[in-house]
Amino acid sequence: MVIDEKTKKIRKDLANDLTKFYRLIQPFLGSKIEHFNYQKALTTLLSDKVGCINEEHQPNFWNYKIDKIVFKLNSDIPKKKLPISASDLKLIISIEVSGDTNKVEEIDPFQTLAFNFTIKGDFICDKTDTVKKALTTFHLDRHIYNNDDNEPIEPHPFYHLQFGGKNLIDEYGGKIDTGELLVLETPRIAHHPMETILGLDYLISNFYPKVRKGLMNGNQEYRRLIQKYQEKIIKPYFLSISSNWEKSLNNFHFSPHWTPYSLNPQIC
């Protein structure tokens, strides 16, 4: 199978934007970046191999994976945290995303999306006066529907942000000392999709707010890059939801699970 020129261009643009994003944030966050190896993602995007989604290979597919990005957090952010003694905090991110260039006219920009971020650190246990590990974790997913799936009983937005989940359990092999904290399957919060660029911009704004403000106000290249991805990803998400009330927006190319109700099941 041969990759057509349209798909090659889209894959090259994705690779160039990843490189540009890293180049733009590095001067501001260089001392905080502990690990940021995206070369594997670039190799996948720029290779002559056809894309792979859910073990299916097609010349119109694109996909990439970044296994591990690590940022060291400042001691003063987040300002509110428990345990209070938590220190040496690190923000750890992984991303896996794919798309289909034959569906560029559809509103949904992705075929799969898994954006995971975890914060890990050390704290001194008051009871034993020993150093222990602590973490908190979130993930943003595009729900995977199989043909024989029934509709979930609980709200299950097509794109959702959720605390905890599988990553929290896996970290401790299923054994967690939760203390007074109740850990359960938390609600899935409807959220717009975020790949590497939008996702990292979101996290930078939360954990390095001064850096993000400086980038947005003082670097037009960074601002234009974020706007480019907001136009492609965030704008259609909210316009699609708005179409529930504004019927003039109904001329979207909805994919089967990209409807106002699927994106936000609370809509009635």
Image: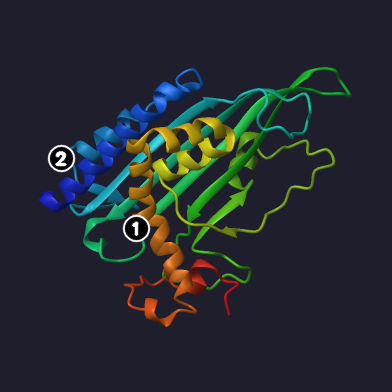
Q: Is disc 2 surrounded by few (<14), some (14 to 19) or many (20+) residues within 10 Å? A: few
Q: Which residue is mark 2?
A: 48
Q: Is residue 67 above or below residue 121?
A: below
Q: Residue at x 87, y 23 (%)?
A: 126
Quarter occupied by the C terminus: bottom right
Q: Residue at the location (24% across, 47% down)?
A: 51
Query: For the residue marked with disc 1, what is the amino acid?
Result: Pro
In the visual, does 86 lie left or right of 36?
A: right
- Callout 1: few (<14), some (14-19), or many (20+) C-alpha neighbours within 10 Å? many
Residue at the (18%, 42%) spot, across then down: 49
Residue sitting at 46 percent across and 64 percent down? 238
User: Where 105 falls versus 176 (above or below)?
Assistant: below
Spatial CA span between label 2 and label 1: 22 Å
Q: Find residue 144 and report its image quarter.
A: bottom left
Q: Nearer the viewer, residue 158 or 172?
A: 158
> Residue 24, image x and y in percent?
36, 29
Q: Which mark is residue 109?
A: 1
